[in-house]
Image: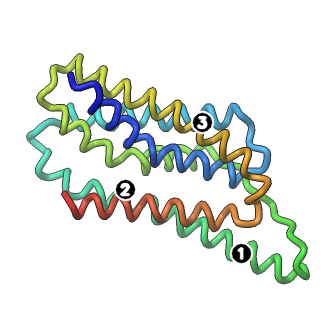
Amino acid sequence: MDWLNILLTSFSMAIDASATNAVNAIREERVPTWKLDFASFIFAIFQFIMPLIGYLIGSGFREFLEPIIPYVGFALLTLLAIKCFYDAIKETIALNKSGGEFKIERKPVTLLGILAEGVATSIDALCIGFVYLSYPFIDALLVFGIIGIVAFLLSFIAGLFGKFLAKFLEKWANYISGFVFLAIALKILIEGFLK
């Protein structure tokens, strides 16, 4: 097995989930560490399961599924970005009506929201399962496990970093969230076009 390639793949797969967890920490006031832990765990599970599903589906459906996966990821993340921009605009209007005093009710990230983010940030990982079709099942399982572990660690670290920055970025949290989700969506779409 090419360990360097596996580690590089793991890091690149974890970037989207890590950015998303950092954004969650910025969006939610005083986000508890257990929630960052839980979100990191969900992201790791999806980063493990999606390549496994891709591997199990195998080459029979590869030609059909591979072209549409980037569009599904793009659509899910774009919807998340639109919701963030909507919330941000609503907050800006409320700020203007209150005479410029910034009082915002920051909403906690919900379980459903974390699950949706987990799916959206890992859907392109289905393709990674196709990449490892030549590996024996146990070796492929090990690779997908490494991808999941790296996703957990990087997501948690990014969440802690986002939690630290939250007090400085509170006013812009939903705009930042929207732009990050949109950037990840565009990255997935562009990667889909370049394949």
Q: Which residue is drawn at 24% across and 24% down?
A: 140
Tell me, for residue 138, which label it has, or none.
Answer: none
Residue type indicated by callout 2? Gly
**N-term-proximal mark, 1 vs 3:** 1
State how far apart marks 3 and 2 are (Cα). Answer: 24 Å
User: Toward which corner of the image does residue 170 lie, by quadrant?
Assistant: bottom right
Pointer 2 and pointer 1: residues touching (CB < 8 Å)?
Answer: no
Identify the residue under disc 1.
90
From the top left corner, tell me how far across and down residue 173 is, in percent. 69, 61
Identify the residue under disc 3.
157
Residue type indicated by callout 1? Lys
Could you say whether the residue bearing mark 3 is in a helix, strand or loop? helix
Identify the residue under disc 2.
73
Pointer 3 and pointer 2: residues touching (CB < 8 Å)?
Answer: no
State how far apart marks 1 and 3 are (Cα). Answer: 30 Å
Q: Which of 81 and 22 is in front in this view?
A: 22
From the top left corner, tell me how far across and down residue 195 is, in percent. 19, 57
Mark 2 packing: few (<14 Cα in 10 Å), some, or many (20+)? many
Q: Residue at x 47, y 44 (%)?
A: 118
Of all residues, the one furthest to the front in this rendering is 4
Q: Nearer the viewer, residue 115 or 191?
A: 191
**N-term-proximal mark, 2 vs 1:** 2
